[in-house]
Image (cartoon, coloured by chain):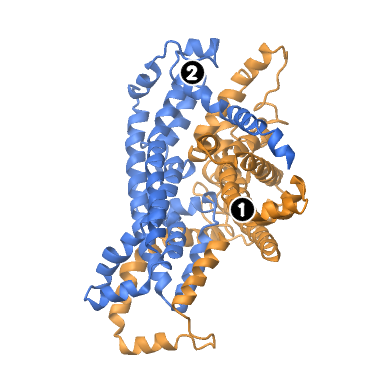
């Protein structure tokens, strides 16, 4: 019992020390984004004095537009994929959670199996399916693959949540004359908001950061996503840390902002649901 | 996870009691079907269930079937015709040193990551299990890599670990004459990659363990302390058993992450240095399929990989869940 008190100062000190060591790699990126390359080699760990925005500006003015085009593609692919997955898996999850048919159980087991499948296992057939649909090396193709691959995760999350929505609410709306579609959109879907927020956060981060799927599906010729762009950028100037770090910094910023913005919403939604429930 | 699921199911069960399980549980349903015309039922299925299912079937289920089928052929788009070869690919696989090496590498990475990220995550979670802004800020420090792309993380560590990278610059300044080639030494590179994945996953484990620690009742700790239990004994007999669900989630997550490791290898070493010293199964599958164009052979590899991932995950999940129940 005594050791907890006499060494009370030890805990914050050890915690701080470990965090600083853990954070060092990220610190090195952050400071070197704002330093000219010569200064990075001379003094990699020092603070940028004076800080320069030249590295960041250079990323935007690249002649191959690797960053700008990648950014547009990433935003389009991520936004559309997560919206479609959220809507489709909310509908499917609700349908399965409310259905008492044996087939609903079978479908559920099938979907859960899909959660464990690593992308490389099915990547080659996926390209074959996309080719037969004429959608290989297109953004639509990549979005559809994302939708198919992430639907099980969404369904699982929504199904758990639908069970907390009282069935009486839906029956009341139906008695009042609302059709199935209207009941879902105006009664059920708004109540599923916390689950939707989690699906959006998880999938937003996963799809934005995804590497292998866009690398293969978009291919080397057409434009690519920012994450694959980072990989392409290091191939070109491996030793220019300033340029590479600036590219990474800008490629990460949007998803970090998205995560932080939605995270608050996610917590609020959860507590809101708790009070109502 | 299991706890909440059971909770939800329990509540649901209270609210809408299921018909008795006598094999004729669909009686109610059959009655409804007889009363209602079939068209709206099908319409509802088509509207709500079908769109999601079609995408899943098209891009996951059918491809799995195709992988299984391809694995029995010599499919190669640049070397037609495709012939059925039975189990020959599988036979070749288990005599293929490159595949066996990839299998061993994958297991090494998975074991290192599972042990280190679990252990480190638990220690840091116990260290940070205090209230206040200070500990909250440190928590987000550890969680940041979880939100970053593994490509970005690989590039960061590349800047640190290449031969003239920041770490070796520092070591030379400290007087080390021949600092190790963290990514260029064939006997070290695999461990560097395992370390990078551990660094990336640590924050996930910390957060899951912290959530678990919050579920340990203070009274239980205090009661044990009053009964004379020391810190170690309190941890072993009170805290650790209550962290069983957190251990399950972390271990399964780390197993799956380790087994499918690809990005770090592709970005940092491209399977080298030398031949295949850091190649993982996922890397080998992708290389064989998209660089070697040997789709039949790569599909056999993929099938073995899937069976291993699924088999190990399910067995570990069962074992850990049985442990949760018995406590």
Among the 4 quarters of the image, the one containing residue A204: top left
Residues beneath discs 1 and 2 located on the same chain? no
Residue B174, horizontal then vertical, whole percent:
69, 13
Q: In this rendering, does residue B165 appear at all? A: no
Q: Which chain is orange?
A: B
Report the disc number at residue A240. Answer: 2
Q: Where is residue B198 in the image (x, y as percent from the top left)?
A: 62, 39
Label 1 neighbourhood size at 10 Å, few (<14), some (14-19), many (20+)?
A: many
Q: Where is residue B314 in the image (x, y as percent from the top left)?
A: 63, 61
Eye-nearest disc, 1 or 2: 1
Which residue is painted at 49% across and 67% down in the image? B8
Depth check: give the residue in front, A172 or A129: A172
Q: Mark 1 lies on which chain?
A: B
Pick the residue in front: A164 or A87: A164
| Residue found at x 61% / y 60% | B85
Q: Colour of chain A?
A: blue
- Residue drawn at point x = 28 percent, y = 78 percent: B40
Number of residue marks: 2
Residue under label 1 = B246
Give me the disc on residue B70.
none
The structure residue drawn at horizontal position 56% and vertical position 23%, both measured from the top left corner, is B159
What is the secondary structure assignment of the residue under circle 1? Answer: helix
Within-10-Å neighbours for mark 2: few <14, some 14–19, many 20+: some
What element does badge 2 sit on?
Answer: loop
When the figure is inspected, residue B302 is found, relative to residue A160, above or below; the finding is above
- Between the residue at mark 1 and the residue at mark 2, the CA separation in whole angstroms equals 42 Å
């Amino acid at each position: 019992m005594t050791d907890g008190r006499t060494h009370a100062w030890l805990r914050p000190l050890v915690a701080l020390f470990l965090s600083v060591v853990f954070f060092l790699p990220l610190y090195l990126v952050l400071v070197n984004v704002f330093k000219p390359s010569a200064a990075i080699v001379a003094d990699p760990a020092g603070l940028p004095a004076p800080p320069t925005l030249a590295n960041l500006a250079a990323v935007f003015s690249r002649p191959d537009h690797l960053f700008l085009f990648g950014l547009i593609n990433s935003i389009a692919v991520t936004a559309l994929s997560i919206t479609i997955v959220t809507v489709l898996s909310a509908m499917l999850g609700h349908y399965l959670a409310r259905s008492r048919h044996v087939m609903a159980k079978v479908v559920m087991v099938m979907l859960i199996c899909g959660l464990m499948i690593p992308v490389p296992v099915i990547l080659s057939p996926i390209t074959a399916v996309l080719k037969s649909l004429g959608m290989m090396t297109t953004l639509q193709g990549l979005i559809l693959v994302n939708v198919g691959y992430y639907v099980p995760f969404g369904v699982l999350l929504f199904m758990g949540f639908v069970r907390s929505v009282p069935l009486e609410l839906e029956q009341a709306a139906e008695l009042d004359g609302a059709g199935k579609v209207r009941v879902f959109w105006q009664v059920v879907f708004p109540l599923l908001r916390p689950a939707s927020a989690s699906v959006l956060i998880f999938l937003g981060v996963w799809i934005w950061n995804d590497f292998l799927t866009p690398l293969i599906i978009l291919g080397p010729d057409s434009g690519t996503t920012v994450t694959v762009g980072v990989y392409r950028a290091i191939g070109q100037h491996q030793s220019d840390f300033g340029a590479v770090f600036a590219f990474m910094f800008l490629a990460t910023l949007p998803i970090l902002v998205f995560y932080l913005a939605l995270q608050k919403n996610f917590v609020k939604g959860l507590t809101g649901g708790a009070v109502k429930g | 996870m299991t706890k909440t699921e059971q909770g939800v199911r329990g509540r649901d069960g209270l609210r809408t009691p299921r018909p008795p399980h006598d094999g004729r549980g669909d009686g109610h349903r059959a009655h409804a079907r007889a009363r209602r015309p079939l068209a709206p039922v099908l319409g509802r299925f088509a509207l709500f269930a079908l769109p999601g299912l079609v995408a899943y079937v098209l891009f996951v289920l059918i491809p799995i079937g195709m992988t299984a089928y391809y694995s029995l052929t010599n499919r190669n788009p640049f070397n037609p015709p495709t012939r059925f070869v039975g189990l020959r690919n599988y036979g070749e696989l288990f005599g293929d040193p490159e595949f066996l090496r990839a299998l061993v590498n994958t297991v090494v990475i998975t074991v290192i990551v599972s042990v280190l990220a679990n252990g480190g995550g638990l220690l840091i979670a116990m260290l940070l299990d205090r209230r206040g802004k200070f500990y909250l800020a440190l928590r987000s420090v550890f969680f940041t890599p979880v939100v970053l792309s593994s490509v970005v993380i690989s590039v960061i560590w590349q800047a640190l670990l290449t031969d003239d990278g920041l770490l070796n610059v520092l070591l030379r300044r400290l007087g080390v004459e021949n600092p190790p080639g963290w990514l260029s030494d064939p006997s070290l590179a695999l461990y560097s990659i395992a370390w990078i994945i551990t660094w990336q996953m640590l924050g996930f484990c910390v957060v899951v363990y912290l959530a678990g620690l919050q579920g340990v009742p203070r009274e239980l700790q205090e009661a044990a302390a009053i009964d004379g239990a020391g810190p170690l004994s309190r941890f072993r007999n009170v805290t650790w058993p209550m962290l069983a669900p957190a251990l399950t989630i972390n271990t399964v997550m780390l197993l799956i992450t380790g087994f499918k490791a690809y990005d770090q290898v592709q970005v940092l070493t491209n399977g080298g240095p030398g031949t295949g010293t850091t190649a993982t199964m996922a890397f080998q599958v992708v290389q064989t399929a998209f660089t070697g164009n040997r789709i039949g052979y790569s599909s056999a590899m993929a099938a073995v990989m899937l069976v291993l991932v699924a088999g190990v995950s399910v067995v570990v999940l069962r074992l850990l869940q049985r442990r949760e129940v018995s406590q």
